[in-house]
Amino acid sequence: MLRLRWILCLTIVGLIAAILTTSYLMELSRLRHLSSAIDQRVAELVRLKRGIQDKEEKILYYKTEEGIAREAREQFNLVMPGERIYRIEVASPDVTR
């Protein structure tokens, strides 16, 4: 028959092993959670950087003569000197004359 001292020793070793295993599993779970949070933040950062890059490209484009001319045409319906304006009218067959 096992002595009481061996039973106590095995019980303590078992408890320590259980505590260490539980702690290890909890840390693995926390690590997975933090890893997914980092992945989400990196994806958000990449999306924001692409947006900033697009905005910088638009700013550089609209600083050029071509960009200014395009903006003037689209926003204010302006034309360059010497250009002709053509107006196209479409007659709908539904309208009675």
Image (cartoon, helix red, strand yellow):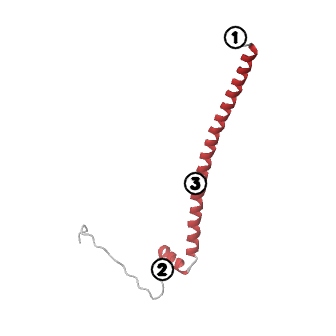
* Residue 3 picture quarter: top right
- Identified by mark 1, the residue type is Met
The structure residue drawn at horizontal position 71% and vertical position 13%, both measured from the top left corner, is: 2
Q: Within 10 angstroms of label 1, few (less than 14), some, or many (20 or more) residues?
A: few
Find residue 67 and name its label. none
Image height of 27 relative to 15, above or below: below
Query: Where residue 73 sits: x, y (%)?
Result: 48, 77
Q: Within 10 angstroms of label 3, few (less than 14), some, or many (20 or more) residues?
A: few
Q: Nearer the viewer, residue 32 or 6?
A: 6
Residue under pointer 2: 78
Give the distance between the C-alpha atoms of the residues marked 2 and 1, in whole angstroms: 104 Å
- Identified by mark 2, the residue type is Leu
Q: Earlier in the sequence, mark 2 or mark 3?
A: 3
Residue under pointer 1: 1
Give the distance between the C-alpha atoms of the residues marked 2 and 3, in whole angstroms: 42 Å
> Which residue lies most toward the bottom here?
82
Q: Nearer the viewer, residue 33 or 23?
A: 23
User: Regarding mark 1 in the picture, which secondary structure is present there?
Assistant: loop
The structure residue drawn at horizontal position 58% and vertical position 76%, both measured from the top left corner, is: 63
Q: Earlier in the sequence, mark 2 or mark 1?
A: 1
Query: Where residue 29 sits: x, y (%)?
Result: 62, 38
The structure residue drawn at horizontal position 50% and vertical position 77%, both measured from the top left corner, is: 70
Q: Within 10 angstroms of label 2, few (less than 14), some, or many (20 or more) residues?
A: few
The residue mark sitting in front, 2 or 1, is 1
The residue mark sitting in front, 2 or 3, is 3
Q: Circles 2 and 1: CB distance less than 8 Å?
A: no
Q: Nearer the viewer, residue 4 or 72?
A: 4
Quadrant of the rendering where the N terminus is positioned: top right
Find residue 43 and name its label. 3
User: Regarding mark 2 in the picture, which secondary structure is present there?
Assistant: loop
- Identified by mark 3, the residue type is Ala
Query: Where residue 83 sits: x, y (%)?
Result: 44, 86
